């Protein structure tokens, strides 16, 4: 029996057009060889394979093994045998990939570990080995070692361009890209430390509600991609990762396709190039039909099916390939509640979720949810116990659902029928009640009218009062007895208090919050919502005044009062606001563990709130308020990551700033918040000019929004002063500190942390000028204030102890300096801890105590290398190393190498605290044999 000529022709054509060489053959070519030999007699098969010059021995043995398996199988479906062929290929390619790429350099990265491979390419864990900072990334590149085709090059270029435009907290970001020395395109992506969504849920025995919450996060990320005209086309659990904080991250847009008419004829779905995962592919993908948003809806429906009931919906691997494809295209899976885990089913997996999932899994794309948002909206309706859209056609279901949700109202209506006879007796009471409400409205109107009347210039000798004066006058009126009823007075106290809070009048805002709380009847559920609002206002004011303990107590009181709020919608909103306020309080109190534990809950709740409000128009106040809440929580995550020197800090802060720019209009103060954190990160990377530019921009914009007298303007000036000091512009730094101190002392008081921070940084300028006596006096003042108001383990007390010890050391009072450090706690923040350790080493060196100094210096060098691109402290470490080598009488070459390392570190390290140009220059003058004459001027 001879092989079909067309099959041999196809094999030869593939071999020639792909430029095969020995051992460099892809699976498609081996499969074509298998098809060419399958109908030959066994003796001819072996001879034909042996004559192929492109194969190595392993590949020849593999093809012959496939042919033996084919001969022994039921030949009714050759594709059933072909399915097993890929397993051998994958295993061999896995070994080949490991051998080829492991330990190779790609751009500035070193390849470390194969994370996975698929139809589009392979994904590797890699580490940055140049650029001055440590970074772990995921690198995606083509899985084949042969020359890359033009089609694949085009697809990779499209993927890179597409990924660069996707910005969403739930989508892994693109960091870099290019081609290897071999011409293989690669993408460098954010490395997500997480687990596939199904694995994550199993490991934690997540409840049904928690699983739906994760699906909603995935919906939010996928909808953002669709909004950018991008579909994923390979949605599966392995591409939906969940980190330790419960945040969903969508990864691997490797086979995504831009939704653009110009791509309609792109070769991404040409024969042999269909890239998908069979168990999560849509029918139209398998048929080779055009794919769009509906395909992602289907695949996410498959993930939801498996996540909610614990079993996959399609593609049983025990079936043959053709059978699997036919099943996916034609057969509906059973409803998830009929196959699900009993525990999940008892928790609510029933008809409604069945309908939602099965609508997403309809075979015809036009019968599914039209968008991911529509699917998310139905999941939210299920969460909120509202009628789901997937069952909208069942009028009896909708009626029962509404009756269930409104049973109280219906019962009341029934009772009303029985009470009609009492209406006539009750009409007078109702009219009296209406009169009371009318009188309350008139009194409130008169109060507001009087406030605006007081703005009349005629009442102020021609001077128009500013916003602060008007708010202060309103506050004075509210704090006095008047004819306002209790509820109206409380609401006006809250409104006026929030205005005063925004204007920086924190003590007056606190007075109004307390006044409003005092007039509300205690333990009255009808006023619970107003009580929570006032307690939140009180917590905000106390936090601005750095009264952390009372602020925490107010949040706790608000949380207790929340249980009494009757309106479900109001209770949901207030709960998210409380989570936001608690997270910011924890951050201000340096409670990093509490922030890490509570931030994921706050983010999930805020995302759910935003998703729930998506039905409102973009300008709707509720929708905008929900987005502003999410923006606040994203900023808290950014600030926390910066404080913890997290590797995610830059990504989180860029996300926070990007989201704020979408949420707030151009001149809104909400756009300013993340700029300072981005400036800090730029400084940590050694980009002093960028940090200075951002800080100058922040002060100019803050001043434009709030004016010169607002504490936020003063804080922006304080931060700009820090950048001026680092740049050596001491006069400019002092000018900013002088302005900031005047404003903060007046608005926040002498002992407020921000006021003390100004004094602390002012002292640092004196230290940089080597005026150590003045610096010591100022640092002692700051330390005394902090001891009065901070807990013994507060990081700012450790900062003061280090600053005082530095001054004492420079003044030659090293015993007092050591005593100061011994009495202090070790800072948790890495940079502050390194500074204190280095200072202690300098002091011990001064005392002649060298002991284990070499190992400690080595550890510090390793720490600073790991902290890269944050170079702070590198110059001091290099100075320590040079002095230690000199003590050991190291040879000339070692000292010269250490000196060169010191000079290089001093060029990079803008934040030098423990080494000065003067003392290094003095050392160089006494070591002319080590320092080249041409370099001594450095």
Image (spheres, rainbow, N blue to C red):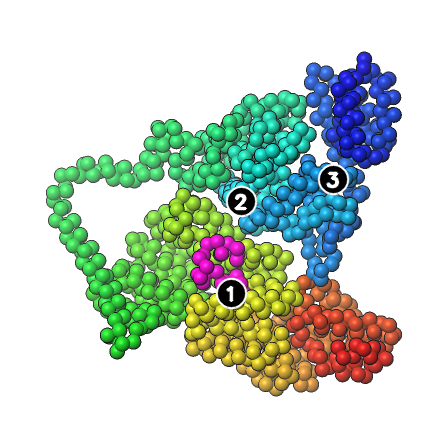
Count of marks placed on residues:
3
Instruction: Calculate the distance from the C-alpha at mark 3 to the C-alpha at mark 1.
Output: 53 Å
Looking at the image, is mark 1 or mark 2 earlier in the sequence?
2
Is any part of residue 301 visible from this angle?
Answer: no
Looking at the image, is mark 3 or mark 1 earlier in the sequence?
3
Tell whether 800 sits left or right of 560.
Answer: right
To which residue does mark 3 refer? 148
Q: Label for residue 588?
A: 1
Q: Are marks 2 and 3 in contact (CB under 8 Å)?
A: no
Compared to 352, does 771 lie above or below?
A: below
Tell whether 863 sits left or right of 207.
Answer: right
Compared to 401, does 165 lie above or below?
A: below
Front label number (1 vs 2): 2
Give the magenta range: 656-676
Considering the image in quadrants, where does the N terminus appear?
A: top right
To which residue does mark 2 refer? 228
Q: Residue, x 68% and y 76% (percent of image)?
A: 914
Q: Secondary structure at mark 1?
A: helix
Q: Residues within 10 Å of mark 2 (few under 14, many from 20)?
A: some
x%, y% of residue 347?
A: 48, 37
x%, y% of residue 422?
A: 14, 41
Q: Residue, x 34% and y 35% (percent of image)?
A: 402
Front label number (3 vs 1): 3
Q: Secondary structure at mark 3?
A: loop
Instruction: Calculate the distance from the C-alpha at mark 2 to the C-alpha at mark 3.
Output: 28 Å
Q: Residues within 10 Å of mark 3 (few under 14, many from 20)?
A: some
Q: Quadrant of residue 425?
A: top left
Is any part of residue 718 visible from this angle?
Answer: yes
Considering the image in quadrants, where does the C terminus appear?
A: bottom right
Residue 13 falls within the magenta-colored stretch = no
Residue 657 falls within the magenta-colored stretch = yes
């Amino acid at each position: 029996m001879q092989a079909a000529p067309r099959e041999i022709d196809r094999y030869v054509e593939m071999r020639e057009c792909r430029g095969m060489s020995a051992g460099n053959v892809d699976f498609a070519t081996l499969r074509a060889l298998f098809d060419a030999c399958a109908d030959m007699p066994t003796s001819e098969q072996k001879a034909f394979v042996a004559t192929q010059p492109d194969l190595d021995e392993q590949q020849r043995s593999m093809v012959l093994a496939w042919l033996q398996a084919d001969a022994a199988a039921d030949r009714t479906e050759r594709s059933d045998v072909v399915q097993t062929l890929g397993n051998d290929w994958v295993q061999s390619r896995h070994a080949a990939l490991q051998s080829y790429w492991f330990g190779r350099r790609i751009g500035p990265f070193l390849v470390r570990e194969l994370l996975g491979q698929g139809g589009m390419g392979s994904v590797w864990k890699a580490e940055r080995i140049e650029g001055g900072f440590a970074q772990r990334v995921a690198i995606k590149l083509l899985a084949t070692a042969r020359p890359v085709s033009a089609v694949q090059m085009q697809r990779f270029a499209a993927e890179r361009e597409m990924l660069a435009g996707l910005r969403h907290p739930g989508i892994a970001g693109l960091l870099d890209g290019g081609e290897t020395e071999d011409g293989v395109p690669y993408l460098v992506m954010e490395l997500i430390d997480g687990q596939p969504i199904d694995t994550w849920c199993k490991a934690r025995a997540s409840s049904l509600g928690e699983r739906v919450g994760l699906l909603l996060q995935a919906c939010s990320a996928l909808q953002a991609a669709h909004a950018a005209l991008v579909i994923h086309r390979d949605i599966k659990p392995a591409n939906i990762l969940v980190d330790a904080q419960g945040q969903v991250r969508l990864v691997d847009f490797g086979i995504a396709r831009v939704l653009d008419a110009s791509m309609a004829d792109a070769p991404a779905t040409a024969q042999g190039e269909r890239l998908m995962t069979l168990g999560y592919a849509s029918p139209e993908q398998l048929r080779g039909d055009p794919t769009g948003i509906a395909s992602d809806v289907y695949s996410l429906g498959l993930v939801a099916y498996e996540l909610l009931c614990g079993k996959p919906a399609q593609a049983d691997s025990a079936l043959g390939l053709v059978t699997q494809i036919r099943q996916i295209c034609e057969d509906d899976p059973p409803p998830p509640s009929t196959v699900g885990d009993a525990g999940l089913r008892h928790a609510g997996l029933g008809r409604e979720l069945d309908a939602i999932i099965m609508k997403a899994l309809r075979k015809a794309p036009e019968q599914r949810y039209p968008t991911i948002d529509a699917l998310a909206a139905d999941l939210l309706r299920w969460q909120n116990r509202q009628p789901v859209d997937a069952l909208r056609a069942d009028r009896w279901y909708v009626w029962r659902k509404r009756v269930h949700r409104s049973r109280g109202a219906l019962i009341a209506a029934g009772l009303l029928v029985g009470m009609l006879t009492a209406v006539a007796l009750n009409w007078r009471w109702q009219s009296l009640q209406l009169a009371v409400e009318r009188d309350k409205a008139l009194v409130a109107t008169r109060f507001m009218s009087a406030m605006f009347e007081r703005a009349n210039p005629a009442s102020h000798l021609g001077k128009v009062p500013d916003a602060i004066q008007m708010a202060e006058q309103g506050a004075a009126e509210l704090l006095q007895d008047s004819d306002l009823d209790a509820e109206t007075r409380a609401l006006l106290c809250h409104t006026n208090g929030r205005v005063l809070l925004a204007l920086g009048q924190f003590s007056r805002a606190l007075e109004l919050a307390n006044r409003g709380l005092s007039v509300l009847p205690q333990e009255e559920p009808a006023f619970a919502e107003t009580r929570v609002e006032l307690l939140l206002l009180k917590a905000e004011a106390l936090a601005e005044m750095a009264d952390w303990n009372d602020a925490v107590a107010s949040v706790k009181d608000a949380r207790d009062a929340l249980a009494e709020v009757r309106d479900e919608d109001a209770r949901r909103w207030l709960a998210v606001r409380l989570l936001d306020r608690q997270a910011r309080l924890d951050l201000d109190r340096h409670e990093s563990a509490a922030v890490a534990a509570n931030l994921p809950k706050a983010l999930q709740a805020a995302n759910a709130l935003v998703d729930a409000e998506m039905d409102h128009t973009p300008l709707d106040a509720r929708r905008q308020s929900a987005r502003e809440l999410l923006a606040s929580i994203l900023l808290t995550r950014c600030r926390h990551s910066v404080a913890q020197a997290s590797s995610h800090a830059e990504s989180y802060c860029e996300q926070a700033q990007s989201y704020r720019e979408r949420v707030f209009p151009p001149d809104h103060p909400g756009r300013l918040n993340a700029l300072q954190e981005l400036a800090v990160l730029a400084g940590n990377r050694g980009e002093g000019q960028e940090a200075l530019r951002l800080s100058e921009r922040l002060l100019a914009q803050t001043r434009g929004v709030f004016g010169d007298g607002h504490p936020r303007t003063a804080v922006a000036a304080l931060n700009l002063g820090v950048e001026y000091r680092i740049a050596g512009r001491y006069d400019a730094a002092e000018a900013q500190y002088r302005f900031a101190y005047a404003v903060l002392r007046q608005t926040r008081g002498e002992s407020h942390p921000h006021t003390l921070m100004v004094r602390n940084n002012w002292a640092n300028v004196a230290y940089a000028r080597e005026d150590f006596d003045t610096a010591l006096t100022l640092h002692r003042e700051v330390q005394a204030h902090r001891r009065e108001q901070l807990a013994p383990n507060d990081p700012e007390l450790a900062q003061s102890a280090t600053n005082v010890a530095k001054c004492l050391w420079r003044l030659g009072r090293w015993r007092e300096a050591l005593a100061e450090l011994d009495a202090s706690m070790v800072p948790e923040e890495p940079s502050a801890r390194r500074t204190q350790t280095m200072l202690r080493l300098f002091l011990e060196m001064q005392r002649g105590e060298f002991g284990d100094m070499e190992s400690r210096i080595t550890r510090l060098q390793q720490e600073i290398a790991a902290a890269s691109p944050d170079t702070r402290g590198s110059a001091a470490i290099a100075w320590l190393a040079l002095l230690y080598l000199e003590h050991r009488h190291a040879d000339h070459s070692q000292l010269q190498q250490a000196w060169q390392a010191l000079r290089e570190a001093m060029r990079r390290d803008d934040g030098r605290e423990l080494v000065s140009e003067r003392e290094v220059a003095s050392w160089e003058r006494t070591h002319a044999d080590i320092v080249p004459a041409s370099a001594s001027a450095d």
